[in-house]
Image (cartoon, rainbow, N blue to C red):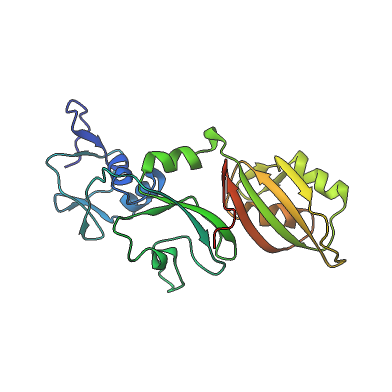
Amino acid sequence: KTSTSSDSVSEIRLNKYLAECGVASRRGADDLIASGAVQINGKKVYELGARVDVKNDRVMVDGKPVRMETRKVYMLFNKPKGVMTTMEDPEGRPCIAEYFQRFEMRVFPVGRLDYDSEGLLLMTNDGDFAQRVTHPKHEVLKTYLVKVSGQPTEEQIRKLRMGVTIIGGRVAAREIEKLRGTNSDKYDWYKIVIGEGKNRQIRQMFEKIGFDVMKLQRIAIGKLKMGGLA
C-alpha cells in the first residue's frame, strides 16, 4: 500500500514510521526504501513519499517484520578504531552491531564515525531525535581530539578557522586550539569543534593545509561528553 492520502490519522510517511520503529534515521530509512529493502503488505516499496497505515499495514525490512517502539532509548557508545559505524558490512568488516547483539531493542547509530576514527557515538531507536542531532539546520557541534603529522603554523590553522573547501562544500573550524605538553617535533595535538559533520571532514580539512591525521577521537556531541567511558 502506497497511498498518498493523509486523511487517516493512522497514516504516516514510511520513513518516519521506520525511524520510529528504531530501524534507522529518516535519511537512513530513505536509503533502505530506495534499495528495495522495505515491503508493505508483501510488496516492495521504492517510493520515498510512500505512506503506511500504522494500524493495518504489515511492514518488513530485509524480510523481517518491524513495529513501532514506544520506549525510547539513548546511549553513549565509545566506538573503537577499526569498526564500521553500520549494523552490517558486505565486506565482512567489524561493525558496531556486534556490541549490541544482546540488547533487547533495535537501535541504530546517530550519524557516523569513520572506520579509522574512534570516540563518542550516540545510539538510539528514536528517529526524530537522530534527525535533530544530525540535520545541519540544528547546528549540533561536535568536538574532536586530533593528532596530526607535523606542526602546522598559526597561519595554516587560521585557514581552518576562516574556512576551506573540501569534497561536499566549504567548511570551517568553529574552534581550534593546540594542546600543550605534547613535547614532540614530529606531531601536534589539537582540539577542534565543527558544526557540519561531512564525510571525513576533519581529515580533509587538515589534508587541505598539508597534514595527515594520525589519530581522531570524538569527545563530545553538543553538551554530551564522553568523559571516562571505557
- Count of labels shown? 0
Quadrant of the rendered image containing residue 101: bottom left
Query: Horizontal and vertical percent for residue 125?
Result: 35, 48
- The residue sitting at 28% across, 55% down in the picture is 36
- Residue sticking out furthest to the front: 228
Q: Is residue 63 left or right of residue 199?
A: left
Residue at image location 53% in from the left, 59% down from the top: 78
Q: Is residue 27 left or right of residue 69?
A: right
The residue positioned farthest toward the top in the image shown:
7
Q: Which sits in the foreground, 25 or 188? A: 188
Image quarter of residue 60: bottom left
Residue 148 horizontal/vertical position (percent): 76, 61
| Residue depicted at 71% across the width and 43% down the height | 173
Residue 17 against residue 188 in the figure, above or below: above
The N terminus - image quarter: top left
Give the residue displayed 83% in from the left and 59% down from the top.
Answer: 181
Q: Nearer the viewer, residue 20 or 34?
A: 20
Percent across and percent down for residue 25 are: 39, 46
* Horizontal side, residue 214 vs residue 116: left or right: right
Q: Residue furthest left?
A: 56
**195 shown above or below 185:** above
Residue 171: image quadrant is top right
Q: Which quarter shows the C terminus?
A: bottom right
Residue 156 at what x, y percent from top left? 83, 49
